[in-house]
Amino acid sequence: MQTSAAPRRLIHHSGDTGRSATRLDALTSLRFFAAFAVFVHHFNGFAKNGGVARVPLLYPWSTIGAHGVTFFFVLSGFLLTWSWRPGRQSLGGYYWRRFGRIWPAHLVATIPAMLLFYDIGWGSDHTNLLSTVSSLFLLQTWFPGVQPTLPGNPVTWTLSVELLFYALFPFFVRWFGRLRTRTLMLVSGAGLTAMWAVDVWAYYQAPTMESWILRTPVVYLPEFALGMAFAFAIRRGWRMRLRPWVVLVALAAYVPVYALHAVGPYGFYGIQIEASVRPTVAVLSVLLIAAFVQRELEGRRGLLHWRPLVLLGAWSYCFYLVHQLVIQAMYDMGLWQPAGNRNIWILLVTSAIGTFFAWALYTFVEEPARKWWSARVPRAVENWRRPEPSGPAVAVERPYTRDRVSS
């Protein structure tokens, strides 16, 4: 393989390895679309007769929205690796700031969730102390016997997955940093293949445990690792001759392939589609991320740099936390509507209400708490595993230069 790009090659190495965008606004905007896809899926329902105000025109295509969380898992691996600066932050400081980034807003959103979903308030679901406490500390996905299946604020099962990512990242980044780009891609591919195999195995061999197995954080590590691998590759100067619209067309083509088999009972083909949807969406997600990052590095701007979209992306974490609460409140207030395509207006109004609460949660909780928390790192925490000016820190710096490739 040559270091210079042949005209017809899809992948090449850029000589401009030192450039990196300090802000990736396009990726911030993409977060909004991923969160909105999850919202549409929950609004429209999981089954043919579900949904608070079903829009038949969107079903079953809206079922792909359930896998908007895959985009977030891949994006987490990419952004953590992209922004990682070896030697500038202690391990204790890293964990402290990660905790302050996600936990305050999660805690505040859990309070109305407990009232809306459970019989301690207006809801009908039953829960217990272990399930509630595990959800508060984002450990609920590790326990197969929690009640209900998604305790606390139901959507926070994905934060439990992210918590494992955050815990392992400082160790993964050192290991990945020692691997060549080609090896990183092979490791990522092997991980996604294992993810598919676990899904197939669970369906046939552990059907009663399948739902819990497929929420266990370890199962999603290949998606996180895929994002990390591409971040390392692009920082090293690796490029793909790929435009975002190509990935979007591929996603649009895949949606009906998945959606027409998203509802059981499954035949053999449906099982394979269901087992492969996460790895497939992960690959499409990382290609979309890579395509937009390359545009940013080239200084090209577009719709995703429009400030309202960037703001919606900034609020997307909070929108994700509150959107199902708004939908549940509609049920509780008797606002359920029969299926009809005119319900698209109800969907849009509901998303606007969710966006308002997301803005409020971001403005008055998430961002102030993050700043307050980050400014108050205890000295003992900040000094825990502080990197030395030489040794391991230097070893981590090496990955951010271009790979040595032989002809």
Image (cartoon, helix red, strand yellow):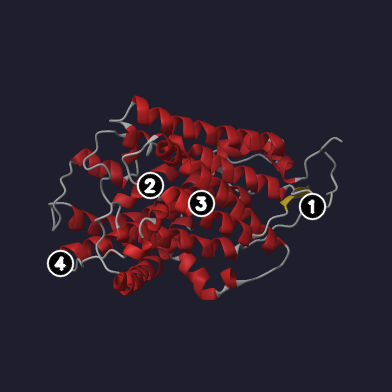
Query: Residues under labels 3 and 4: Cα distance?
Result: 36 Å
> Disc 2 vs disc 4: which is toward the camera?
2
* Residue 162 in picture, x, y percent from top left: 44, 45
The secondary structure type at the circle numbered 2 is loop
Nearer the observer, disc 2 or disc 1? Answer: 2
Question: Residue 334 has which mark?
Answer: 4
- Whole-number angstrom distance, CA of label 2 to CA of label 4: 29 Å
Image point (13%, 57%), residue name = 121
Q: Nearer the viewer, mark 3 or mark 1?
A: 3
Residue type indicated by callout 4: Gly
Residue 100: x, y in percent?
Answer: 43, 53
The answer to which quarter of the image holds residue 343 is bottom left
Which residue is denoted by mark 2 in the rendering?
Answer: 262
- Can I make out residue 101 in this image? yes
First in sequence, mark 3 or 2: give its number.
3
Q: Earlier in the sequence, mark 3 or mark 4?
A: 3
**Tag 2: amino acid:** Ala
The vertical placement of 374 against 357, above or below, is: above
Nearer the viewer's eye, disc 1 or disc 4?
Answer: 4
Q: Which residue occupies 48% across, 56% down?
A: 374
- What's the distance in space between the residues labelled 1 and 4, CA to CA? 58 Å
Q: Which residue is mark 1?
A: 14
**How far, Cα to Cα, is label 3 from label 1?**
31 Å
- Residue 254 is labelled as 3
Q: Position of residue 166 (x, y in %)?
A: 49, 43
Q: Quadrant of the N terminus?
A: top right
Which amino acid lies under the numbered mark 3 shown in the image of this protein? Tyr
